[in-house]
Image (cartoon, rainbow, N blue to C red):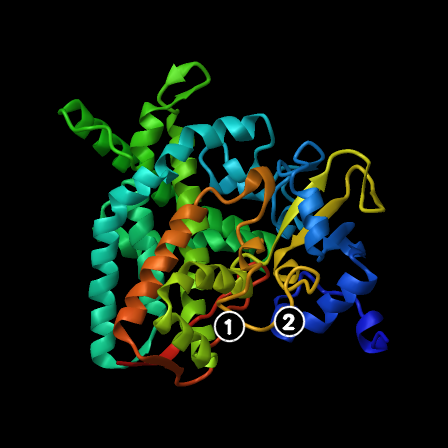
């Protein structure tokens, strides 16, 4: 029987506190009784079942990204003169791959994917492993630590290597990564406009690094598998070398999409293993479970809770009619705990056979381009932790991030026991 206090309340998807105040009974009700819940203030269907999201995501011809993927795109479209509010964050003429629809999306994905191949991952392996080992050794010496700095540093180090930026600029890259998160935050239109001004310096910084890479190549340096090099060698629109506005936009997107989300996944490791010491013991006894443990951590954390799609024509999905001009909000965090796919969904289980069916990276044509790198970082970090620590304990409850999209923590106070 449905609890009336759940069934009759409005689902406040624009309120970040909703996600922190135990949304799971509400999501369970939605999956049972209202799988296409219409959030009337934004004329948006909230999709919480795994099977419905999997039916929608392949249909990029109908469910468009071109109108933006954040709720702020709907809220502030009129104030932005009918444009996407996110456009100001990117350089003029730059195409953001996450906002592109087919066939342009495939073209943009094609020219950038060379930086995300297995050889590209191998190219950054030694430096990234050395960074992880050194940082974890320092944490182990201290014992009681805030794991946040380590979890933040790893993906920023990886992003610098991936893009082709100096590792000495990690602090600057982390600052810009955090600023880019304002795109989906619960802030006013004026605050969004103010945030845009921060990115002139980032655009200049990336331009400087593109010029540096060009100069190195002119002096005889090899091509390289970093993103800047890959884009300088790629062909797009009949010419060799992706134009500068797109190179800048690709680099900014890599910073925005990789740093915070991977940080959340890495913070999830001590958080869930400290609360489930039996699962830590399983991994110490059987390292073959490490990759699946990363999938289970991604499922439980779901670093990006949800993304938006615009309905570009009338369509029916699993019995629900949606009209042109409406939106769907793909609630990945709910789908990742859908009992139809994940038995006992709130239990953390490193042996879960369906763990890899999670939607933490999305699905369909817009499946996260950096998923291989994120998984690689997770496996490297988890193995390094298992090498060093007998157990992990939370010393105090961590503080959650207050945000509409981001599911993460502001700190992670832990005791690392050797």
Circle 1 packing at 10 Å, graded few (<14), some (14-19), many (20+), is some
Q: What element carries label 1?
A: loop
Nearer to us of marks 1 and 2 is: 2
Q: Residue at x 52, y 65 (%)?
A: 301
When the figure is inspected, residue 272 is found, relative to residue 168, above or below; the finding is: below
When the figure is inspected, residue 93 is found, relative to residue 120, above or below; the finding is: above
According to the image, label 1 marks what residue? 400
Residue 198 appears anywhere in the view: no
Q: Is mark 2 on a helix, strand or loop?
A: loop
Q: Position of residue 277 (x, y in %)?
A: 43, 80
Residue 308 appears anywhere in the view: yes
Left or right position of 324 against 178: right
Q: Which of marks 1 and 2 is nearer the N terminus?
A: 2
Left or right position of 261 against 338: left
When the figure is inspected, residue 314 is found, relative to residue 384, above or below; the finding is: above
Q: Where is residue 374 in the image (x, y as percent from the top left)?
A: 41, 52
According to the image, label 2 marks what residue? 344
Q: Which of 52 and 37 is in front in this view?
A: 52
Q: Residue at x 63, y 68 (%)?
A: 345
Q: Nearer the viewer, residue 86 or 356?
A: 356
């Amino acid at each position: 029987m449905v609890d009336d206090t759940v069934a009759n309340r409005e689902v406040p998807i624009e309120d970040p506190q909703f996600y922190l105040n135990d949304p799971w009974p509400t999501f369970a009700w939605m999956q049972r009784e209202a799988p296409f819940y219409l959030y009337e203030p934004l004329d948006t269907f909230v999709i919480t079942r795994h099977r419905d999201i999997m039916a929608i995501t392949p249909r990029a011809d109908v469910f468009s990204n071109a109108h933006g993927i954040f709720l702020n795109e709907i809220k502030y479209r009129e104030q932005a003169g009918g444009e996407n509010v996110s456009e100001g964050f990117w350089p003029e003429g730059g195409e953001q791959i996450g906002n592109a629809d087919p066939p342009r999306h495939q073209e943009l994905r094609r020219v950038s994917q060379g930086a995300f191949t297995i050889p590209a991952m191998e190219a950054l392996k030694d430096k990234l492993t050395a960074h992880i080992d050194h940082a974890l050794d320092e944490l182990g010496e201290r014992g009681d630590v805030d794991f946040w700095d380590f979890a933040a540093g790893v993906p920023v180090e990886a992003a610098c290597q991936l893009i082709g930026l100096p590792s000495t600029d990690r602090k600057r890259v982390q600052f810009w990564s955090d600023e880019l998160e304002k795109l989906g935050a619960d802030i006013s239109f004026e605050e969004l406009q103010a945030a845009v001004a921060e990115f002139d310096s980032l655009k200049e910084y990336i331009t400087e690094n593109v010029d540096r890479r060009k100069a190195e190549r002119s002096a005889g340096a090899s091509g390289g598998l970093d993103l800047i090099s890959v884009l300088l060698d790629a062909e797009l629109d009949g010419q060799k070398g992706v134009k500068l506005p797109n190179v800048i936009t690709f680099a900014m997107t890599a910073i925005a999409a990789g740093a915070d989300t991977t940080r959340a996944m890495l913070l999830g490791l001590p958080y869930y293993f400290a609360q489930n010491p039996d699962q830590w013991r399983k991994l110490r006894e059987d390292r073959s479970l490490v990759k699946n443990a990363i999938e289970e951590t991604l499922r439980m954390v779901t670093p990006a809770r949800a993304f938006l799609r615009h309905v570009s024509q009338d369509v029916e999905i699993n019995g629900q009619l949606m009209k042109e001009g409406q939106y769907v909000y793909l609630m990945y965090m709910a789908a990742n705990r859908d009992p139809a796919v994940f038995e006992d969904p709130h239990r953390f289980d490193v042996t879960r056979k369906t763990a890899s069916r999670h939607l933490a990276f999305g699905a369909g044509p817009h499946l996260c381009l950096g998923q291989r790198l994120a998984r690689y970082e997770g496996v490297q970090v988890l193995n390094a932790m298992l090498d060093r620590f007998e157990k992990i304990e939370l010393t105090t409850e961590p503080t959650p991030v207050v945000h509409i999209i981001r599911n993460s923590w502001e700190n992670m106070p832990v005791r690392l026991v050797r």
